[in-house]
Amino acid sequence: MQPWNRSTWNRSTWNRSGTHATGRHGRCRRRLILESPHVTSNEAQTTTLGVLDIGSNTIHMLVVDADPGSRPNPLEETKSTVRLMQYLKDDGSIGKRGVKAILDGVDKGMALARRRGIDRLLAMATSAIREASNGGKILRAIEKSIGQPVTVLSGDDEARLTFLAARRWYG
């Protein structure tokens, strides 16, 4: 089989969004995903995904069914309001009560993830953790709590993802 890439597809049957003319959920789209040498059959099945967003104002856990080739289907979410600015000290660190608020929010999100039986977790932290003078220590505490590394988004990545989310939600 020829190596898989976009140029090997019959472009005349694909529309601007990259989905097959038979529709986003058409059999041709699924067959191409399943036949890609870069995707194993296990990866091409629906996955229950948990997305943990550790921000400056909220800790947000969103659980979705992620089916390759289609939009994620939100199942359930939980948010904990933390408003970390109120815990910021003069030295740029987040105080003990703020760290506790973060960890409590993470625990609440992980309880939802366990209850929903997620297959995979994507955990991201934004500017609050990135810019706090004790951000590394907080990050290690979060990683210990969830049992995996947390991606700390750069300012550019955070802005790009915020834009994409707003564009998706508001058209």
Image (tube, helix red, strand yellow):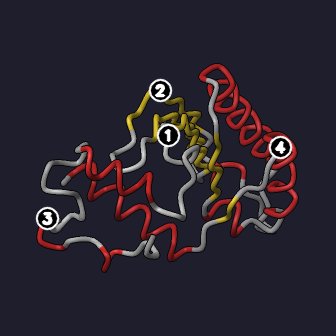
**Label 3 is placed on what type of residue?**
Thr
Q: CA distance from mark 4 to mark 3?
A: 44 Å
Q: Give how far across and how far down residue 151 sits, in percent.
A: 68, 61
Instruction: Identify the residue position indicated by label 2 in the image.
Output: 76
Q: CA distance from mark 3 to mark 1?
A: 24 Å
Instruction: Identify the residue position indicated by label 1 in the image.
Output: 45
Residue appearing at x 69%, y 31% in the figure: 110
Residue appearing at x 73%, y 38% in the figure: 101
Mark 4: give few (<14), some (14-19) or many (20+) Cα within 10 Å.
Answer: few
Q: Earlier in the sequence, mark 3 or mark 1?
A: 3
146 relative position to 23: left or right: right
Q: Is 42 situated above or below 40? A: above
**Label 2 is placed on what type of residue?**
Glu
At mark 3, the secondary structure is helix
Mark 2: give few (<14), some (14-19) or many (20+) Cα within 10 Å.
Answer: some
**Label 4 is placed on what type of residue?**
Gly
Quarter in which the C terminus is drawn: bottom left
Given contact means CB atoms under 8 Å apart, are the residues at marks 2 and 4 in contact?
no
Q: CA distance from mark 1 to mark 2?
A: 20 Å
